[in-house]
Every structure is written in structure tokens, then in C-alpha cells.
Image (tube, coloured by chain):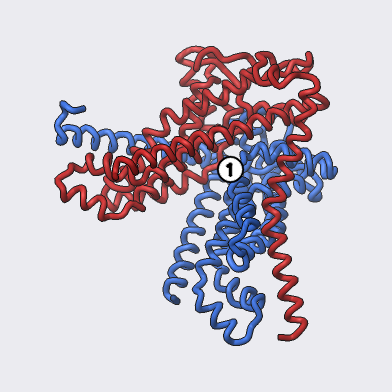
Chain colours: A red, B blue
């Protein structure tokens, strides 16, 4: 091998190695920047008062984000409550029940929906849902409206990944169950769904991550009120919305507090993910015991 | 449940699945159709090629917005594509199965789950403030690179792994160095996959809003350089809906967005099919 070839080879390897390391560098940089900018908040307010404080009045030096935490949990929970059963029903329809022709049309349609920008969902929510929810009381900008918009946003993710999981179940499982005389529904509920369980849970975790992290569509329909929401018809604010709405003009402790909101949001996502993964592991365990 | 016969349960369940599934897909598709029906009538050549009037009127078109979007995505891709391909080459061709590789894969995985607004905060702190790029297209593009990197790496890695092993063995047997094999055999063979990955990233870039809302400044004027502020199509939908309440214009812009996403989707599906058909044929 020529020396020049040797040098090129080494240089190329080092270059691609640096490229690969960039992802981990970015992750570390994100954590360092957000933590460093967020921590000074806690010289002014205690961690407890920050997380459990009811008042967010930056001009008065009050930085309590409990209303936003509740807002984020409420919309995510509300969205998933509807999206999980509907999404799984839809995935079963696509993977197993619907005739081949129908699937061929619906599957690309769902793929397309995954890519629709969130502002489009927000806009439709603003134009159609807000006036509709106003009929129920309040001004229409509410946790309920936001939950419905989020539901529409996470459904395509849940459907398409659950559909993949259901289709990955070996045909022999299904055929075996049917051959034993199980009805189609028995086959689906006792063979297909348990076998595809990890994929379905993964789809829900992903959908949940999307829901907690969604920002612009939420700002458009939730009203962004800093008051503590008392009913699903009340306006509220999410953690993400709090950051986006105020970061462009914030300074000093106010700015730090928004970064601290980011820390809480990150923790939130980590906790949600680990809970789901633990539940998932237990589920698999139980299922394995059941089989043996 | 015990009292219901399996046959009845079967009927009820099937009815539930059909009703739930059909209603869900129906509603979702109606959202898209509604936007297209309301938006397309306001679309015209004029709308695409006139500058927005600015201020609170919401009048005018989206020409400057299109230019900003193109600048933003162009800048993003110039950085994203080489870095993404490099990282994918490392992971697919070189990476030994050790701790370091594990850490990199974990990093890519975690990065993919971080919400857009957190990237926005990071971009705001690093690019806008610390590096003094101000609220600009450059700050937005750099932030987008961070968000899209996991998608680019993973999709490209799949494409590189799809290249048959015989290609590499053939090149190496002819005396090519490892890098010659990668750069002249593997990457050209994986090219359609790399293009698919790039277009996928363009699609995602077009939909991103939150991270750009806090790094691009949102000026509707024609950008004069990468350091000017700007608005993307998605941001324009947001500003039109929230600040000027020009809902018809917002719908028209949203319709443009959906049409772009449809084109991007169709193109990637077509490319991916061709790519895998070709690879399959060669094995």
C-alpha cells in the first residue's frame, strides 16, 4: 500500500469518527447549556417553590411552575386517553381486519399524516375546535381543546408503529390460534396483541414524547393562561409553551427560570419514559410466566 | 365477559374495531382535506410571488417566506448531510462493538427523543447569545442540524448496511484500501438511500416550528444574508393565525405546506422502492 493511501485511510477514519462523536457532543452540550443557564434560578427561588409554586409572575420575582406542570400532564393524559384505544383499534384494522385493498389506501395515508407539521393541526384546532368547545362553556381555549388537537397529532405515530408491530407477529401464531378454533377476536386479543405488546408500548411512549414536547400547536389552542386550571374547560399553559412564549423577551432571573423550566421538562420526559419501560418489562415478564 | 359467548364478543369487538378505526382515519384525513379545500382557493401565482405586507394586516403573499425557508434548509443541509453521512459511515463500516460505539448509539437514540423546544433553548443560548449569531437564519439552521442529525444518521446507516457485502469484498480483493472501497463503491451504491434520508430531513425541517420560533426572530422581510432573521412557512402559519388572525392566508400557507409534504412523501417512497428493488436484484 502506498504511504499516501495509508494516510488518506487514517485521515478518513478519524474524520468519520469525529462526525459520529458529534451527536454525543451535541447531547452533552445541550445538557450543560440548559443546566448552567437554569441553575442560577435556584439562588432566587428554592427548588421546592419553583416546582410547587402556584404563581408565575416574573415581574414580581415569583417563579412557580406548578400550573404549567399540571397543564402539561393534563393535556398529555387527555390526549393519550383517547389516542391509545383509537390508535390500537386503527392499527388492528390496518394490520389484520381490513381487506387488502383498503389497507393499501390507508397505510400511505397514515404515513402522510405522521409528516403533517404540527402548526397545521394547531390551525385546524383554532378554526374548528375552539368555537365548538366554546359552546360547552369558557372561551374555547382550554385543556380539552388542546387534548383533542394533541390526540390528532399523536394518533398517526401510534397507528403506524403499532401496525408495524402487529404485522411483525409470525403468521404461524395467528394460524395456530385460528386452527384451534379461536374466533378472530380471540386470536387478536389473546395472541396478536400480547405478541406485539412491546411494539405497541413503544408506539405509545413515542406518542407520549411527542405530546409532552409539542409546543406551537399547544400555544395556538390552550390559551396560555398562567392561572391554575380547575376544569378541562379552563385555559392553561404547558411547560413547552411557557418557554416559547417568553424566551424572546426574558432577561436575568426570568431567563434563567425559563431554562430551569427546560430542565423540568427534560426530567419529565426521562421519568415518563422510564415508567413506561418498567411497566413494559413487567408486562413481558408476566406474559412469559404465563406461557411457561 | 364470561357470560358473553365468544361469537357475540367477536361481533362486538369487530364492530368496535371497524368503527374506531374508520372514524379515526376519517377524522385525520378530513383535517388534511379541510385545509386543502379552504386553502387552495386562496392560492395563486401572485400569492407565491408577492412579499407579505407585514405589520398586522396579513395582506400580501409569501415570497420572502419561501426564500427564507429555502435559505434555512439549504444552510442546514450543507452541514447536516456531510456530518450525517460521516457518522453513518463510521457506525456502519468502522464501529467496533465496544463501549464507545455504545455511547454514540445511545447519544443518537436520546437526541432523537429530545423535544424541539429544548433544542430551541440550546440554540438560543449557544448560537443566538453566546456566539452572537443573533436571531438569524444561521442560528435556526445550526439548531435544525442538531435536531435532524439522528434522523440523517439512522436512515443513512440503514442505506449503507443495505449494500451487499460482496461489493466490499470485491473492491478489497482488487487491492482497494478501506477508504477507497467506502468512497468509490459503498457510498455510490448507497446513494439513493442517502438521497432518501436527505429528503426525509427536508420534510422534517419544513414541519419544525418551536426551535425556529426561538432562534430565527420571525422577520417577514426579504433576508439579505444568513445573519438576517427570517420566517419559515410553518412559522408564517403560526404568525398569521396568532398575531394577525388572517385565517384565510394561514390556511393557504398551510395548504402549501401539506402539498410540499405530499410531494416529499411520494418522492421518498418512490426512491426507497427503487433502491431496495435494485439492491435486492443484486444480491
Q: Is residue A290 above or below residue B267?
A: above
Q: Is residue B150 left or right of residue A59?
A: left
Q: Is residue A104 left or right of residue A252?
A: left
In which quadrant of the rendered view does residue B230 lie?
top right
Q: Which residue is mark 1?
A: B113
Crowding at dot 1, Cα within 10 Å, few <14 / some 14-19 / many 20+, comes out as some
Residue B129 appears in the figure? yes
- Work out whether residue A175 or residue B227 is closer to the camera in this orientation and state it: A175
Q: Residue at x 71, y 45 (%)?
A: A28
Q: Is residue B229 above or below residue A82?
A: below
Q: Is residue B246 left or right of residue A63?
A: left
Residue A146 percent location from the top left of the image: 52, 26
Q: Residue at x 38, y 41 (%)?
A: A285
Q: Residue at x 68, y 14 (%)?
A: A55
- Work out whether residue B117 or residue A113 is closer to the camera in this orientation and state it: B117
Residue B86 percent location from the top left of the image: 66, 63
Residue A139 percent location from the top left of the image: 54, 15
Residue A287 percent location from the top left of the image: 34, 41
Q: Residue at x 60, y 45 (%)?
A: B110
What is the chain letter for disc 1?
B
- Work out whether residue A273 or residue A281 is closer to the camera in this orientation and state it: A281
**Number of numbered discs present?**
1
In which quadrant of the rendered view does residue B192 lie?
bottom right
Residue A128 appears in the figure? no
Element under disc 1:
helix
Q: Give the quadrant of the N terminus of chain A.
A: bottom right
Q: Is residue B51 above or below residue B9?
A: below
- Work out whether residue A250 or residue B43 is closer to the camera in this orientation and state it: A250
Q: Give the quadrant of the C terminus of chain A.
A: top left
Amino acid at each position: 500500500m502506498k504511504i499516501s493511501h495509508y494516510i488518506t485511510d487514517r485521515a478518513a477514519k478519524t474524520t468519520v469518527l469525529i462526525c459520529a462523536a458529534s451527536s454525543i457532543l451535541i447531547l452533552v452540550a445541550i445538557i450543560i447549556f440548559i443546566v448552567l443557564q437554569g441553575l442560577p434560578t435556584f439562588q432566587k427561588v428554592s427548588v421546592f417553590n419553583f416546582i410547587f409554586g402556584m404563581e408565575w409572575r416574573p415581574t414580581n420575582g415569583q417563579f412557580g411552575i406548578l400550573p404549567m406542570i399540571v397543564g402539561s400532564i393534563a393535556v398529555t393524559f387527555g390526549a393519550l386517553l383517547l389516542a391509545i384505544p383509537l390508535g390500537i383499534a386503527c392499527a388492528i384494522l390496518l394490520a389484520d381486519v381490513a381487506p387488502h385493498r383498503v389497507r393499501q389506501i390507508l397505510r400511505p395515508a397514515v404515513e402522510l399524516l405522521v409528516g403533517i407539521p404540527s402548526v397545521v393541526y394547531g390551525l385546524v384546532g383554532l378554526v374548528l375546535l375552539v368555537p365548538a368547545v366554546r359552546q360547552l362553556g369558557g372561551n374555547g381555549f382550554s385543556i380539552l381543546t388542546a387534548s383533542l388537537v394533541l390526540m390528532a397529532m399523536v394518533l398517526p405515530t401510534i397507528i403506524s408503529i403499532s401496525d408495524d408491530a402487529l404485522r411483525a407477529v409470525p403468521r404461524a401464531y395467528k394460524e395456530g390460534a385460528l386452527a384451534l378454533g379461536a374466533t378472530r377476536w380471540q386470536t387478536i386479543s389473546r395472541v396478536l396483541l400480547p405478541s406485539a405488546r412491546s411494539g405497541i408500548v413503544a408506539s405509545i411512549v413515542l406518542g407520549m414524547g411527542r405530546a409532552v414536547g409539542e409546543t406551537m400547536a399547544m400555544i395556538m389552542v390552550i390559551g396560555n393562561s398562567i392561572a391554575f386550571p380547575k376544569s378541562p374547560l379552563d385555559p392553561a399553559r404547558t411547560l413547552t409553551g411557557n418557554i416559547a412564549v417568553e424566551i424572546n423577551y426574558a432577561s436575568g432571573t426570568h431567563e434563567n427560570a425559563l431554562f430551569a423550566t427546560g430542565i423540568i421538562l427534560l426530567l419529565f420526559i426521562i421519568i415518563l419514559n422510564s415508567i413506561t419501560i418498567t411497566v413494559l418489562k413487567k408486562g413481558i415478564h408476566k406474559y412469559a410466566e404465563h406461557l411457561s | 365477559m364470561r357470560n358473553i359467548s365468544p361469537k357475540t364478543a367477536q361481533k362486538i369487538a369487530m364492530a368496535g374495531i371497524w368503527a374506531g378505526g374508520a372514524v379515526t382515519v376519517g377524522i385525520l384525513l378530513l383535517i388534511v382535506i379541510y385545509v386543502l379545500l379552504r386553502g387552495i382557493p386562496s392560492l395563486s401565482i401572485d400569492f407565491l410571488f408577492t412579499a407579505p405586507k407585514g405589520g398586522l394586516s396579513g395582506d400580501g403573499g409569501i415570497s420572502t417566506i419561501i426564500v427564507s425557508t429555502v435559505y434555512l434548509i439549504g444552510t442546514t443541509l450543507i452541514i447536516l448531510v456531510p456530518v450525517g453521512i460521516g457518522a453513518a459511515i463510521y457506525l456502519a463500516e468502522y464501529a467496533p462493538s465496544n463501549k464507545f460505539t455504545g455511547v454514540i448509539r445511545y447519544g443518537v437514540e436520546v437526541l432523537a427523543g429530545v423535544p424541539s423546544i429544548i433544542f430551541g433553548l440550546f440554540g438560543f443560548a449557544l448560537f443566538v447569545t453566546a456566539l452572537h449569531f443573533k436571531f438569524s437564519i444561521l442560528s435556526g439552521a445550526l439548531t435544525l442540524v442538531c435536531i435532524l442529525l439522528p434522523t440523517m444518521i439512522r436512515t443513512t446507516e440503514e442505506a449503507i448496511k443495505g449494500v451487499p457485502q460482496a461489493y466490499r469484498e470485491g473492491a478489497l480483493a482488487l487491492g482497494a484500501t478501506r477508504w477507497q472501497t467506502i468512497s468509490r463503491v459503498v457510498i455510490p451504491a448507497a446513494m439513493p438511500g442517502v438521497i432518501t434520508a436527505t429528503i426525509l430531513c427536508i420534510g422534517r425541517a419544513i414541519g419544525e416550528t418551536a426551535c425556529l420560533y426561538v432562534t430565527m426572530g420571525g422577520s417577514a422581510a426579504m433576508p439579505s444574508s444568513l445573519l438576517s432573521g427570517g420566517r419559515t412557512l410553518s412559522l408564517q402559519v403560526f404568525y398569521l393565525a396568532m398575531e394577525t388572525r388572517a385565517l384565510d392566508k394561514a390556511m393557504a400557507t398551510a395548504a402549501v405546506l401539506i402539498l410540499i409534504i405530499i410531494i416529499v412523501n411520494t418522492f421518498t417512497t418512490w426512491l426507497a422502492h427503487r433502491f431496495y428493488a435494485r439492491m435486492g436484484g443484486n444480491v
